[in-house]
Amino acid sequence: MSRIGRMPIAVPAGVDVKIDGNVITVKGAKETLTREIHPNMSVKVENGEILVTRPNDEKENRALHGLTRSLVNNMVVGVTEGYKKELDVIGVGYRVAKQGKDLVMNLGYSHQVTMSEIDGISIEVPNPNKIIISGPDKQKVGQFAAEVREKRPPEPYKGKGIRYVDEYVRRKEGKTGAKKK
C-alpha cells in the first residue's frame, strides 16, 4: 500500500469539496480549484476527510495512488493557505519593479525583460532585489517562478542572477592568474 496514498486528507472548515465522476472541485476562501484525476483512482469524502483508493496493485495504479493524493492535498492547501515562492535578484545594476500587472526586470541585458502576471498568480516586489510570487495553485506558482528565474539563472563565478531564497549556488574559483615565463 502506498504510504502517501493511504493517508486521509483533512478538510478544514470553510472548504467545500465536490466530486463529479473523475473531476474534483475544491472551493475555499481564496479561490476554487478544479482538477481531473485519472479514471482508475476513486476519491471519496467521508467524515470530513478525503480518501483516495486504487482498484488493484498494478504498477501504474500504485504510482497514481500517491500522485493523486498529493494533487488533491495540494488543492486543499492552496485554497486555504496558498503557495509562495521568493526569488532574490543578485548583481550590480540588477533590479526589478512592478508596473501595473507587469514585472519589469533590468538584468544586465541591453533591454528590459518584461513578464506579465498570469491568471491565478500575483507578483509582489517589496524591494528592487526581491520578487514574491504567490497563488493557490502550486504548479502554476512553481512554473512561473521557474520562468522568471530562467531569464537570468545564477552563474557560478560571481553568483549573479535570479535565484530562489533558499537556493545554494556552488561557486567556482575562476582563472588563477597570468602565465608564468
Image (cartoon, rainbow, N blue to C red):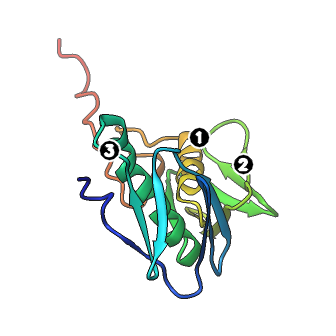
- The residue indicated by pointer 3 is 56
Callout 2, which amino acid? Met
- The residue indicated by pointer 2 is 115
Closest to the camera, between mark 3 and mark 1, is 3
Which corner quadrant of the image does residue 133 belong to?
bottom right
Residue that extends furthest to the left in the rendered view of this protein? 181
Closest to the camera, between mark 3 and mark 2, is 3
Left or right placement of residue 5 versus residue 20 in this view: left
- The residue indicated by pointer 1 is 151
Q: Tag 1 or tag 3, which sits nearer the N-term?
A: 3
Provide the secondary structure element on which disc 2 rests: strand
In the rendered view, would you say 139 is above or below 13? Answer: above
Q: CA distance from mark 3 to mark 1?
A: 45 Å
> Which residue occupies 52% across, 70% down?
76
Provide the secondary structure element on which disc 1 rests: loop
Location of residue 122 in the rendering, given as x and y in whole percent from the top left corner: 68, 65
Location of residue 176 in the rendering, given as x and y in whole percent from the top left corner: 22, 28
Q: CA distance from mark 3 to mark 2?
A: 45 Å
> Can residue 94 be seen in this snapshot?
no
